[in-house]
Image (cartoon, rainbow, N blue to C red):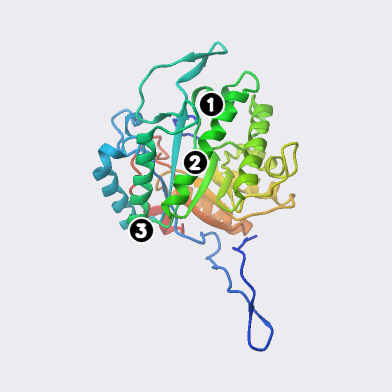
Amino acid sequence: MTRRTMTKGVISALQATLIGCGGRAAAPPAPPQPTPGTALFRGGSNYNWYQVDAGNVYDPYHVIVNYNTQSTVINAQLASMYANGQRRLAVYLYDWNRYVYVAGVPTLNPGVSGTLVDVTGGALPSQIQANLTAFLAAVKAAGFQQIIFGLAPQGVLAPSTWPSWQETYFQLTWQVVQAVRPLLVASGLSYLFDLQTEGMPAMVEPWYAIQLQYAQRLWNLYAAAYGTADTVGFSMNPFSGQAATEIPNVYGASAYGNNGYPPFFDFHFYDTPSAQFIDCFNIIQTQAVKRPWIIGESYYDDAYTAGQIKAAAASTGQVIEYLLQWSLTLAGASIVPVAFDQWIAEGF
């Protein structure tokens, strides 16, 4: 598992064929060519919490939940991140319906959280809709070039907690996806949708069969409705390559459809990053479909981890679109992710 404390070949864009006056097709422009081991584009941070108190307490301070009262603080942090060289972000919605499993029984949890968003009925609360819209506008105004928006289902909405398949909770999640996507489109900000953070199944997980069905169904619903261009599908905890093994099982033909693959594979690398990277690379080389990678999470501004990932990318030749750090140091401290110096120094 990752150390986060909350549960949790280049494919270019299609180029139009240009016909010159001599009747021959002009060659399309070449894609960016990075230094070996570095990213095509500048990355940035997972930016979910604007404050961390002593003891790694951050739950009261989610940027979307609190944007209506903390926009000044959040906008200032966005400006600082941009000034420090960051150009891409990710943010996650921690959705739940106020129920958790207790001894296998869904039980109401009336607790109040500054991170969890109650999506009972499949809709976002009006204040959260307004906050997300305003936050995305602020990200765009600050100059950021893209955001990954993802779901991090909690309580009974998390398939890892299900004692058996739960159709009601699955349908609730699909309704949330349908409620959120129009807000992303309307923002005018380039985005990619992560349908569930670290939602790619892995055989090591006791809930593997449920997670596989969940990912296959949700992927094919999304891809059939909206296409595949604006999503990373499911980001991946590598599990020493086990998640990479499941890529064709989720995105390839299944009982729920065969709607293609996302344009990028999104991996999260923390401990032993070089070995995890190479494990995933070697497994994907045996598969028919390959993609550029987004490194969607790794340690905050850490020189050692940056060097390890750079070395692994250079030795394999794997193309990295960009990298996003998580707000967690190698020493285990949560932090507001303003700096990005060590990653920039290694070409990310």
Q: Alpha-carbon distance for marks 3 and 1?
A: 34 Å
Residue located 54% across and 34% down the image: 175
Q: Quadrant of the N terminus?
A: top right
Dot placed on the residue nearer the N-terminal end, 2 or 1: 2
- Foreground: 246 or 211? 211
State the image quarter where residue 37 is shown: bottom right
The answer to whether the residues at label 3 and label 1 have Cβ atoms under 8 Å apart is no
Q: Which residue is mark 3?
A: 143
Dot placed on the residue nearer the N-terminal end, 3 or 1: 3
Please indicate, yes or no, whether residue 1 appears anywhere in the rendered image: no
Q: Amino acid at mark 1?
A: Leu
Q: Position of residue 174 (x, y in %)?
A: 57, 34
The answer to whether the residues at label 2 and label 1 have Cβ atoms under 8 Å apart is no
14 above or below 1? below
Q: In the picture provided, is 289 more to the left or to the right than 155?
A: right
Dot placed on the residue nearer the N-terminal end, 2 or 3: 3
Mark 1 is surrounded, within 10 Å at the Cα level, by few (under 14), some (14 to 19) or many (20 or more) other residues, namely many
Q: Alpha-carbon distance for marks 2 and 1?
A: 14 Å
Mark 2 is surrounded, within 10 Å at the Cα level, by few (under 14), some (14 to 19) or many (20 or more) other residues, namely many
Q: Alpha-carbon distance for marks 2 and 3?
A: 20 Å
Q: Which residue is mark 2?
A: 150
Q: Secondary structure at mark 2?
A: strand
Residue located 44% across and 45% down the image: 183
Which labelled disc corresponds to residue 157?
Answer: 1
183 above or below 111? below
Q: Amino acid at mark 2?
A: Gly
Q: Secondary structure at mark 1?
A: helix
97 above or below 2? above
Q: Amino acid at mark 3?
A: Gly
Q: Position of residue 236 (x, y in %)?
A: 58, 41
